[in-house]
Amino acid sequence: MAGLTEDPELGINDIKEETERNNKHIDKVVGVVAEESVLGERDMAPPAGGLIHRSSSRPQLDLSKAAIQGNFEERNPTILLPNQSDDISHLALDIGGSLIKLVYFSRHEDQSINDKRKKTVKERLGISNGNRRSYPILGGRLHFVKFETSKINHCLDFIYSKQLHRGMDARWNSELPANENTVIKATGGGAYKFADLFKERLGVSLDKEDEMNCLVAGANFLLKAIRHEAFTHMEGQKEFVQIDHNELFPYLLVNIGSGVSMIKVDGDGKFQRVSGTNVGGGTYWGLGRLLTKCKSFDDLLELSQRGNNGTIDMLVGDIYGGMDYSKIGLSASTIASSFGKAISDNKELEDYRPEDISLSLLRMISYNIGQISYLNALLFGIKRIFFGGFFIRGHAYTMDTISFAVHFWSKGEAQAMFLRHEGFLGALGAFMSYEKHGLDDLMAHQLVERFPMGAPYTGGKIHGPPLGDLNEKISWMEKFLQKGTEITAPVPMAPPGTTGLGGFEVPSSKGGILRSDASALNVGVLHLVPSLEVFPLLADPKTYEPNTIDLSDHSEFEYWFTVLSEHLQDLVDKAVASEGGTDDAKRRGDAFARAFSAHLARLLEEPAAYGKLGLANLLELREECLREFQFVDAYRSIKQRENEASLAVLPDLLIELDSMSEETRLLTLIEGVLAANIFDWGARACVDLYHKGTIIEIYRMSRNKMQRPWRVDDFDVFKERMLGSGDKKPPPHRRALLFVDNAGADVVLGMLPLARELLRRGTEVVLVANSLPALNDVTAMELPEIVAEAAKHCDILRRAAEAGGLLVDAMINTLDGYKENSSSVPLMVVENGCGSPCIDLRQVSSELAAAAKDADLIILEGMGRALHTNFNAQFKCDALKLAMVKNQRLAEKLINGNIYDCVCRYEPLR
Ligand SMILES: CC(C)(COP(=O)(O)O)[C@@H](O)C(=O)NCCC(=O)O
Ligand SMILES: [Mn+2]
């Protein structure tokens, strides 16, 4: 689909034809009703290499498959009922005076691989659908898009091009006729005003939903379901607030649109509009337009950025000869009277700078709204106030002013909070009003927010709705490359701390560039993955923070920004090579590099732009970006090569290990894991090393260097738990979860031998690996083959793998396909639910969650899983964290050590 916005000539009929062509093509290639791709759009060209599973790092594991195929074996299958979805459109609108907000749903690609191994593991682990709901939920994505109301035709074109106005099934099957009776939920005044236009152009009826109902439903959904939705904004500093669901109500919802509504919310559907004010966004825009001749709301806001309200407002200092009125707590810069100076100055309107007028107006209105909100909160005994509505537009100064007012008048008792999806409350609420979509009680761990390069932006402005088509994205990037125009991160903002002390100082100018509502990248696409679960062995999920390194510390971000930027070219080379180095791959490689750089640049400007940012998020963003440009597995051949080399020496290693005493063997095994963790293609220092020798040479060198004590060395405590002391022989662990890291030597010569030792001691072992590729990490799909190869040379591994259903070939020879092998505890493989070098244990696969229930030992391996994330995580069972630190700065910061130091942290359950 050629760019709707790039090419205004493209009419609805062209789009229709194009869409139909694409639909047919996709249906043919895929052979089934086509699903949405990673790009989330119906109308993209099919990938070169056939249909691959590349939708997100948190793939949906089995839900939609069960739905489509109707898994008759399970008693309460979580199914997607086709009849449930085909008569409703999964699109909702909030049509306001200045903006149309659109929320739409796209279904996930079907990603489940119901292979034999998985089935056996499920049987072993006793996974049924018992912990699932008995009603259907849709796995998919929620997209947020907006248009100016004055350009409603663009909005209609967009809906048409994506076929959002058709019922679900009709969208996915172009042969089906559009349902003439499709009804779209809509709120806002435009739902009335434009009803005929929608009927005429799209043949759909708008079902009008009450605006207040929608606002509240939208806010409740966001506050319950999105982890980093609410934040405070004081003196330029944004801080995300985690709100306990049980303590959410009551709260005051202040929606600042043209006018302002103040709503006391007591629960779902329980609310009362307690107050409001007619001095709102419309007032700012209306008065501002008259006084400054500004042409748009955004221009007016941008003007305020360079303004000094002290030239117009009467300040306390003006009255008190430059002094504070400290007795009543008023500083000299406090506004005593908005526009008050204009009375005494002998000036006309033209004598005032439009910038100053705009700022004065903005402060007058924001401050007033903040104050009235607080007074209402006080009246109703409410502590928390959430501000929403498109007036705020993520504008730092507006938020600071409101926060100041609330803080000042409440003497710090009440708190103003803002919402990342501030403008979409109504549209989301309208969306929620569809019955039977099953989204009402989704929880934070079932939602993953992604930030695709979804919109064409340059020069600080978003130009039109998100790009969906891969080709469209690439050509757009190329166009700017050709022109030599740097793609800028969408709308930089002033660095923290410049928006004014206590909200009363003048914001320092940043060349008039405003971080505003334009940044569609501020809200990503919400991936709904109903099968994700919180890892059950987390000691306290509420206080768990996966990231060890917080990137809101600017110097920290700058460091990692540089590391990732420097690594980019190498990654692009690997990615392009992994796809055969074709011209198409090169184009995608360039586009990927551009896109990822743009994300980095955006985050450098504002680390909190995409929610709370940790290193894990940054590393995951990189993988997501690769997937967005359809790089399936950049390190595929490297992994294969290293697996082969390591498997070749494994038999010798096993013989060597078997000749040792139990005690020496355990130490050698742990040393082996630490030494083999050097095979990390994500670390600059290691990649440099690989040019200097073969894998096996490096492995030997690394092992020889293993000097105890390690920088963090709890080996003796671990050994005592494993082997006991004196005559006391402790019982073996029942089940161990081994979170494996890299392919090649890391898993083959490090983790597998350790797994074998545990198996030998009677502990069941579950190898936990990534669902999707990330750097050179081994994936759950790849592991069975590696294990099968290793098992050829080792009886312990073979019997355990057979018992765990890993040796599919062996199983095929048995009658029922699954042989209960009582002579060995099983070795199993489960996927972790993610596709990143790090792991957030609040969102793991249901398979892993089930495997965890009987586990009493977890072993986390590698820098990503044990250091960048989970270094401080506490568990409900024994935990061993093993990693080699392959980065000097991290070594200094985390363990006060040096590059190549090792961590063996053992934390027994007390
Ligand atoms: C991406 C990684 C976390 C992977 O490490 P692993 O988990 O494989 O041990 C690590 O390679 C890393 O932090 N790399 C960036 C730092 C650097 O290049 O020094
Ligand atoms: Mn790794």
Image (cartoon, helix red, strand yellow):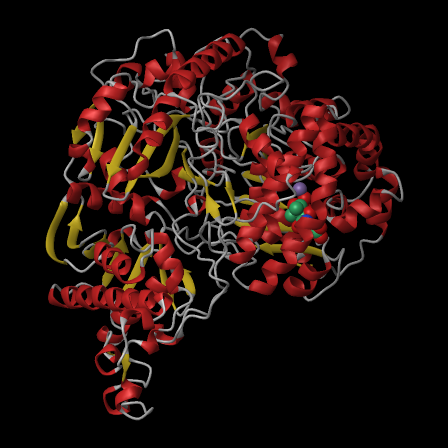
| Ligand 2 placement by image quarter | top right
User: Image point 25% across, 68% down: which residue?
Assistant: 364
User: Image point 45% across, 54% down: which residue?
Assistant: 544
Q: Is residue 132 visible?
A: no
Q: Above or below — where is 616 with respect to 45?
A: below
User: Image point 37% across, 43% down: which residue?
Assistant: 444
The quadrant in which residue 279 appears is: bottom left
For this rendering, which residue is in front, 625 or 111? 625
For this rendering, which residue is in front, 621 or 476? 476
Q: Position of residue 863 (x, y in %)?
A: 65, 49
Q: Position of residue 838 (x, y in %)?
A: 58, 45
Q: Is residue 169 visible?
A: yes
Report the side of 856 relative to 568 (left or right): left
Report the side of 519 relative to 223 (left or right): right
The quadrant in which residue 70 appears is: top left
Q: Position of residue 395 (x, y in %)?
A: 37, 58
For this rendering, which residue is in front, 707 or 236? 236
The quadrant in which residue 842 appears is: top left
For this rendering, which residue is in front, 503 or 383? 503
Q: Above or below — where is 432 with respect to 201?
A: below
Q: Position of residue 133 (x, y in %)?
A: 30, 29
Q: Disc count in the image?
A: 0
